[in-house]
Amino acid sequence: MLTLLLLLLLLVPMMAAASLYLGFDFSTQQLKVVAMDGNLNVVHQNSVQFDQELPEFRTQGGVHIHADGLTVTSPVLMWVKALDLLLDKLKRAGLDFSRVRALSGSGQQHGSVYWRRGASETLKQLDPDQNLHQLLQGSFSVSDCPVWMDSSSTQQCLDLQAAAGGPLRLAEITGSRAYERFTGNQIAKLRLTQAEQFQETERISLVSSFAASLFLGGYAAIDYSDGSGMNLLDIRTRNWSEVCLEATAPHLGRLLGAPLPSTSVLGPVSSYFVQRCGFSESCRVVAFTGDNPASLAGMRLQRGDTAVSLGTSDTLFLWIRRPRPAPEGHIFCNPVDRRAYMALLCFKNGSLTRERIRNECAGGSWEGFSAALRDTPLGNNGNIGFYFDTMEITPPAVGVHLFDSDDNKVSSLSPQVEVRALVEGQFMSRRLHAERLGYSIIPGTRVLATGGASSNKEILQVLSDVFNAPVYTIDLSNSACLGSAYRALHGLVAESGVSFLDVVKNAPEPQLVATPDPSAPEVYDQMLKRYARLEERVLQES
């Protein structure tokens, strides 16, 4: 009996290592994949760059920017052909597809795909001797699909908000006010501008559910999380909002299909991939989701966490239980916990603004910039700055606005004070707007930092102080892919009640880099109230 137990203890890790889980990411410029074993080790990564490897589609940055400068599309067959190429690369690399127990993926959020009548039958009867892009050439009613960069549906946004009862009411229903790039508004516009093609459409997918459909050999449902980036899904009932559907297009519910939980197993992989690539018939396809929700999974965020990406623009991902939708930011259904939500906030003035102040106030030196942060006190003696070099998203303001400790507007600050005013101001803005969406600091709250500025420990110390939470750094170079692989593994056990965090508990831990100063709450809780008042003033002046 003891020998059998020892044998089992030896075999379980070996069996876990033998199983593979694939995570795909159909992003704007490339298609990527990660292969992960059952012990959460990445064993293979690969990609197809659209511009370089598929030049026949003549994209720049993976898209076509039209003459009006507002309309931005991508060729759907490019994504299909990229999958052909990627699977060939995996074959040549020696990946054993028969070991893949489950796969999932993500797609660039807000892109949409329009399947022509009869495409459903085509998907069911794919010939394994031919490439996918050859077999599906006639399957799309719209050859170039609107993507997230498109901003040509302003009128449709106004119409939708009017139908819903205004921007705030629409945000309360769908998690966001109307945005030009959101799928519902793109559908409304396409129905008018490409009426004939719309009439030929039998199903509308998001990029994520389109990609899942390829693997499934049939139409995949839109998942709750990516579906909540459409201005169409009621984020509380997790059904399509009838008001929004009716304002967008007739019979739209039928064209979209019923949404499903993001943890759903959609079915077995298509026999096409079993015969062509050698997948096992028992391999399962777990619902695909948007790239932002997949990144939340890849970062392994948990209740109370926030992730801050400090790049050209700064982005916040938040795990929240009780959302407060507002006309700013976005609330999505959480991709790994059916009872929770994720919030997303984007700020245009990020690293480029930090670089400008570094050049002007620290002689172009990051060491000088860091020294200024070290040599100035928490709270900056009451000096506050707003730095909007370009028109900000949240709040919609522009210009540099500086205030002294008595809330008087001033024309300049000393170089050291200005460095801290910039960094404190940016992070107070991030916290203020996160709290307005339902974020709150609770025991155990962590901040996960990534992006270029996360290598600067002094910047992260200010982040820790303002948020009154420990800051960790994490490598997010492939977070959407990795999150998709994690979700593939979790999908197999989610219905049994196993939590996502239990599934990924053995993944590498992020590194602790900063803890808040004990005096931080006393300083910033008061300063944040001042910042909110001054922001209102800046908005009125802008």
Image (cartoon, rainbow, N blue to C red):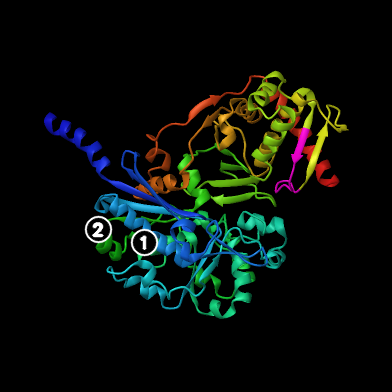
- Picture residue at 33% right of the left edge, 71% below the top: 124
Magenta segment: 385-396
User: Mark 2 touching mark 1, by CB under 8 A?
Assistant: no
- Vertically, is 2 above or below 398? above
Q: Quadrant of the N terminus?
A: top left
- Vertically, is 96 above or below 137? above
- Picture residue at 50% right of the left edge, 79% below the top: 200
Reading the image, the residue beneath label 2 is: 278
**Residue 53 versus residue 475: which sits nearer the camera?**
53
Specify the amino acid type for callout 1. Asp
Reading the image, the residue beneath label 1 is: 84
Does the magenta portion include 188? no
Give the mark nearest the N terminus, 2 or 1.
1
**Residue 458 versus residue 524: which sits nearer the camera?**
458
Specify the amino acid type for callout 2. Gly
Task: Name the chief secondary structure element in magenta.
Answer: loop
Q: Is residue 457 visible?
A: yes
- Vertically, is 460 above or below 339? above
**Residue 535 versus residue 111: which sits nearer the camera?**
111
Q: How many marks?
A: 2
- Picture residue at 64% right of the left edge, 70% below the top: 247
Q: x and y percent of residue 82 in the render?
A: 41, 60
Does the magenta portion include 392? yes
Q: In the displayed structure, does residue 95 sit left or right of residue 453?
A: left
Q: In the displayed structure, does residue 282 sit left or right of residue 365?
A: left
User: What secondary structure is marked by label 1?
Assistant: helix
Q: In the displayed structure, does residue 60 sit left or right of residue 409?
A: left
Q: Is residue 334 visible?
A: no
Q: x and y percent of residue 507 in the render?
A: 39, 35
Q: CA distance from mark 2 to mark 1?
A: 14 Å
